[in-house]
């Protein structure tokens, strides 16, 4: 297998080298992989992340870097990386060191059994109650919007994933710019499976995944994968029209009872 690895990175200069080294060492132990490439997509970091990965790429022929012209979010960064990936399968993994590449062999085994997407689901979510509640609601909404039910896969716990070349080609054929990669993968409907793993602590720094990022992604999902906005506008239009019609009847009755000045009712109804 020729394996591509796509890593979105934003202000991860303290973590990215150790993550890259761990990936290099892990992949060399896999007999299923005879060739690999690593693509790091810098999401327009404000620190020296891009310089760090560029220097690293100069020492490793199988590593290269891409820098987005503005900050666009991890899902857009992942899609930029997928557009450049050439492998038979593509591993999408984070740059903070929390995802464990030692689980890659199990994921490859599931791909070789015919699955097109393999998710790595964390055993536990070490987050605040509010964050957990938001994630649960978030992914239930996604399933309802897309209409694709995968009951055994809890995407609220999904972190990294492995895609077959067939899935990558399908994703690259979808031209939407503001969308969720997770939502797109569910919507495409390929055969999917998962593994369970223990998520590690961050090596350094703080998470960049905040409430604002979650809300922006939720908005993109709703707009990209449903007709809900159009339906809401239609319903609002009907309600406003009904209110206007009832008010017109009220004005007509008000005028017939002699309370309105001549000419006022006609103008008000129009």
Image (spheres, rainbow, N blue to C red):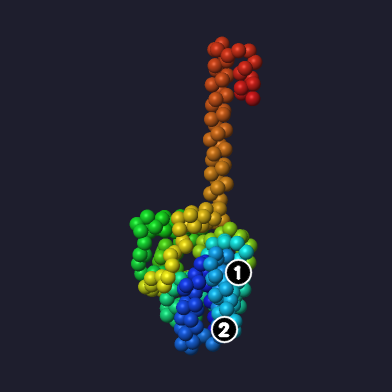
Q: Which residue is drawn at 35% across and 64% down?
A: 126
State the mark number for residue 67: 1
Q: Where is residue 8 in the image (x, y as percent from the top left)?
A: 53, 69
Taking the view exactly as shown, the residue that stands out farthest to the top is 258
The number of numbered badges drawn on the structure is 2
Query: Does dot 2 land on a helix, a strand or a loop?
Result: loop
Q: Where is residue 21 in the image (x, y as percent from the top left)?
A: 48, 81
One can see residue 206 in this view = yes
Please tell me which of labels 1 and 2 falls first in the chain.
2
Q: Position of residue 243 (x, y in %)?
A: 53, 30
**Relative to residue 88, is residue 214 depicted above or below?**
above
**Relative to residue 59, is residue 128 depicted above or below?**
above
Judged left or right of residue 61, residue 152 is left
Q: Residues within 10 Å of mark 2 (few under 14, many from 20)?
A: few
Q: Quadrant of residue 119?
A: bottom left
- Which residue carries the number 2 mark? 60
């Amino acid at each position: 297998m020729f394996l591509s690895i796509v890593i979105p990175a934003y202000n991860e200069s303290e973590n990215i080298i150790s993550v890259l080294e761990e990936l290099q060492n892990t992949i060399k132990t896999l007999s299923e992989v005879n060739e690999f490439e690593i693509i790091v997509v810098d999401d327009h970091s404000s620190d020296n992340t891009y310089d760090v990965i560029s220097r690293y790429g100069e020492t490793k022929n199988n590593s290269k870097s891409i820098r987005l012209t503005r900050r666009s979010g991890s899902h857009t960064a992942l899609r930029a990386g997928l557009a450049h990936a050439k492998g038979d399968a593509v591993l999408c993994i984070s740059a903070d060191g929390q995802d464990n590449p030692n689980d890659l062999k199990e994921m490859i085994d599931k791909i070789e059994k015919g699955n097109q997407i393999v998710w790595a689901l964390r055993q536990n979510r070490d987050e605040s109650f509010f964050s957990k509640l938001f994630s649960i609601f978030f992914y239930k909404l996604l399933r309802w919007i897309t209409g694709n039910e995968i009951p055994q896969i809890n995407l609220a716990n999904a972190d990294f994933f492995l895609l077959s070349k067939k899935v990558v080609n399908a994703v690259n054929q979808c031209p939407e710019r503001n969308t969720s990669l997770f939502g797109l993968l569910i919507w495409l409907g390929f055969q999917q499976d998962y593994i369970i793993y223990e998520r590690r602590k961050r090596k350094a720094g703080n998470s960049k995944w905040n409430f604002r990022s979650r809300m922006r992604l939720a908005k993109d999902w709703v707009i990209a994968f449903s007709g809900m906005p159009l339906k809401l506008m239609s319903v609002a239009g009907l309600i406003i029209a009904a209110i206007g019609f009832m008010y017109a009847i009220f004005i007509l009755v008000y005028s017939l009872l002699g309370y309105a000045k001549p000419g006022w009712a006609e103008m008000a109804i129009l």
